[in-house]
Every structure is written in C-alpha cells, then in structure tokens.
Amino acid sequence: MKLLHVVGARPNFMKAAPVLRALEQIEGVQQILVHTGQHYDFNMSDVFFRELELRAPDVNLEVGSGSHAEQTAQIISRFEPVVLQQKPDLVVVYGDVNSTIGAALVCAKLMIPVAHVEAGLRSFDRSMPEEINRILTDDLSDLLFTPSSDGNRNLEREGVEAAKIHLVGNVMIDTLVRMLPKALLKRPKQTPEHYALVTMHRPSNVDDVSWFSSLLKVLEDVGDQIPVVFPVHPRTRQRIQDLGFAADNSHRGLHLLEPAPYLEFLSLQAGAQVVITDSGGIQEETTYLGVPCLTVRDNTERPVTVEIGTNVLVGCDPQKIRSEVESVLAGRAKRGNIPPLWDGHASERIAAVIAAGAFASDAHRECAATAP
Ligand code: UD1
C-alpha cells in the first residue's frame, strides 16, 4: 500500500511524525512525505524535522507565503502533478492549515482517497480561515480520525457516514508523551524560575491594530507581576514592528524571543505558571500538562480543553486576562484532567485503521485503474 502524507505548516509536523512512525511498523506500507513549503523558515520548519526525527520530505513544493487564495492555489497546482506521478492509494492530511485543504481538494478531484487526521473540530466561527479549511477537508475525506468525541458529534450532525469516522485520540499528544522527558532537559538557560508564556499569531488578534496594541499593553502589565516569555511568530513580529513597539521590552518584564524549537517550547510550557495563547495545539498541550491556559479567543474548536482541561476562554477582554492571571498567581488556577484517548497511542490506532484498508470505494478503485 502506498501512502502519501502532506505537511506544510508548523503545527502539522508534530502530528505527522508519530503517524509515519506507527505506519512504518506495518509490513507492505510504502510512505512518501510531501512538504508544501507553506512554512519555510528554519525555525518554523527544519528544526522541527530534526527534533522530531521526521524523515526529510521526498518532495518540497516550495509554495511559500501569499494571500490565502495565492497560497492555496499554489499548493493545488504544484501538488496535482505529484499525485498523478506517485499514484498513492491514500493521501493523509493533517490539521486545518491551507496545505490541508489544498491537498484534500486535489485528491478529491482525482478520486484518490483522503484521510484527515484531527477531523471534526469546529469553532463554528467562519471568520477563521482554519474553520473553512476544517469543514471542507472533512467533507472531502474518506477516513476521518477524530481526537475527541465532540468531533464525532460534529461530523454526524453534518451527515458524514458513521463508518468513515474513527475516534482515535490526539496524535499531538503522542509526540508530547514521547518527547517530554527529552524536553525537560532542554529548558533555555536564561528562563526565569516563574514566568508566564505567551504566543499570539491569529489574524483576529495580531491584524487588528487597535486590539493588538491593547493586548501588548496588557502583556506589559502582566510583565509587571511575573516575567513574560513570548516567542514571536513571524506574522506577529511583522505587526509588532509595524506598530513601532519596542522589540526589547525586558525592562517591563516582557521578553520577546525568536520562535522556539519544539523541545524548548514544550519545556517552556511544562514549566510555566500560566500560558496565554491563541494557538489551537497549545490549548491541548497545556491541558495534558495540567498548566493553566488562557485562550485569547471568543471560541474554541477544542471544547474538551475547556470542559475537561485547564483552558479558559478570555476573549478580547483586557480585564478578564488581568483577573485570570491574578487568580492563577494567587493559587486559584483552574484544575483539569486529561481527556480520554490522549494517551500517546492515537497514531497506532490510526495505523491499524489504515492497515485494515477500509477506505477505497469501488469508484476509487475503478478510477485508479484508469488514471493516466
Ligand atoms: C498558519 C495556519 C495556522 C497555524 C499557523 C501556525 C493557515 C490558514 N493558517 O498560519 O492555522 O496555526 O500556521 O504557525 O494555514 N512566515 C514567515 N516564515 C515562515 C512562515 C510564515 O516569515 O516560515 C510569515 C509570512 O510573512 C507569512 C506569515 O508569516 O505571510 C503567515 O504565514 P502563513 O503560513 O500564511 O499563516 P500563519 O499565520 O503562519
């Protein structure tokens, strides 16, 4: 069986690594790895391949940055010839980035079955580009691997055939479980003993000049109470520069750093008093680690982190962020538990379903037989 995996952006790499590893154990499986090149900086891409021991991509489409339409169009037009040449039995896509939907769309048109890892998540907020990517990718997929039961409910409500949906747990946690012991040895030397960890990159936070300025002021205020360690995404770095905000604000306890490699970032999360973020994956990792997480969004596609885990949605409300940080520092942080099946073995469950081969319909087989 020939499988082709597609990755493109930073949050894909830690999801794909354990799935490739689990499938390597299965006899007769050949795997091809395609990197779309959506993320291309060393510290957004290469360093993750190295640390996660992810094999070098067989193909790099080198699409780079652009508007959503430009980037997705480049992914589609550069990926199609690869699929035609490789003729995979199944294409595996991850998460909700532009590379995910671009690849899924190509395969759906070529009648190549698609497996979506991290299916079924919904924020119900269509202003998020990722929500559009999730809905469309799920609609085009033949195998849908969900990380939590809310994903199953969302898909069933949308009319997805139950036989296509597999509740397998969270592959990102597979990587966390495997890497945590190594990560704990990697704490950056100058890290303060107690600190808040911040990441911010969503367009809704960093592209709105007025809100982003207020948010930076809130983070400075937090920095007056506890040092703030803030590895800065390239998109956010650009916005900070546009605002003329001082790059070095360490005098206010706000430390702006380069994006952190996986192990260093995991270690920073594990040791943080509190994490303030708008990332999806970090809501999950903090829940697993039992670290309080304040999510600067009005909604989340990962409700299990709020219902079971340590996540609190603080919206775009400076007062709520300040008061939640105060609660954490006063020892009143929200406590949580680890959701079911976030146990380090999700990828093995995915590999077992794929190995069983229950994804190729008769139409797919017919089409594959006649493909150019
Ligand atoms: C993408 C994903 C988002 C994910 C995030 C993680 C989509 C729609 N969004 O958002 O879901 O949470 O990745 O990082 O796919 N840039 C660089 N170097 C890089 C990559 C990007 O400088 O290696 C800059 C470019 O100026 C680019 C901007 O960052 O325009 C945004 O990158 P892009 O991949 O378009 O989206 P992200 O905001 O990273």
Image: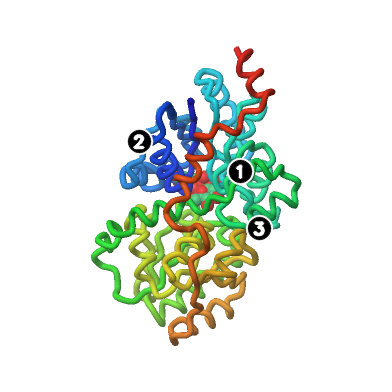
Give the residue at mark 1: 144
**Between discs 2 and 3, the one toward the N terminus:** 2
Residue 136 point in image, percent of width and height: 68, 42
Label 1: few (<14), some or many (≥20) within 10 Å? many
Residue 213 location, x and y as percent?
A: 55, 68
User: Badge 2: how crowded within 10 Å, few (<14), some, or many (20+)?
Assistant: few
Question: Can I make out residue 242 in this image?
Answer: no
The structure residue drawn at horizontal position 38% and vertical position 68%, both measured from the top left corner, is: 229
Mark closer to the observer (3, 1): 1
Please name the residue shown 70% across and 57% down the image: 124
**Which percent across, then down, holds residue 346?**
47, 50
Q: Earlier in the sequence, mark 3 or mark 1?
A: 3
- Give the amino acid type for the residue marked by disc 1 in the picture: Leu
The kind of residue tagged 2 is: Arg
Give the Cα distance between marks 1 and 2.
Answer: 24 Å
The quadrant the C terminus occupies is: top right
For residue 55, the mark is 2
**Residue at image coords 28%, 62%:** 184
Q: CA distance from mark 3 to mark 1?
A: 17 Å
Label 1 close to label 2 by CB (< 8 Å): no
* Image disc number at residue 305: none
Which amino acid is tagged 3?
Ser
Q: Is residue 198 left or right of residue 182?
A: right
**Image quarter for residue 60?**
top left
Q: Ligand 1 within 8 A of label 1's CB?
A: no
Residue 285 position, x and y percent, is 45, 61
Dot 3 and dot 1 residues touching (CB under 8 Å): no
Q: Nearer the viewer, residue 202 or 82?
A: 82
Return the residue at label 3: 123
What is the secondary structure assignment of the residue under circle 2? loop
Mark 3 neighbour class, 10 Å CA radius: few under 14, some 14 to 19, many 20 or more:
some
Q: Is residue 82 above or below residue 308?
A: above
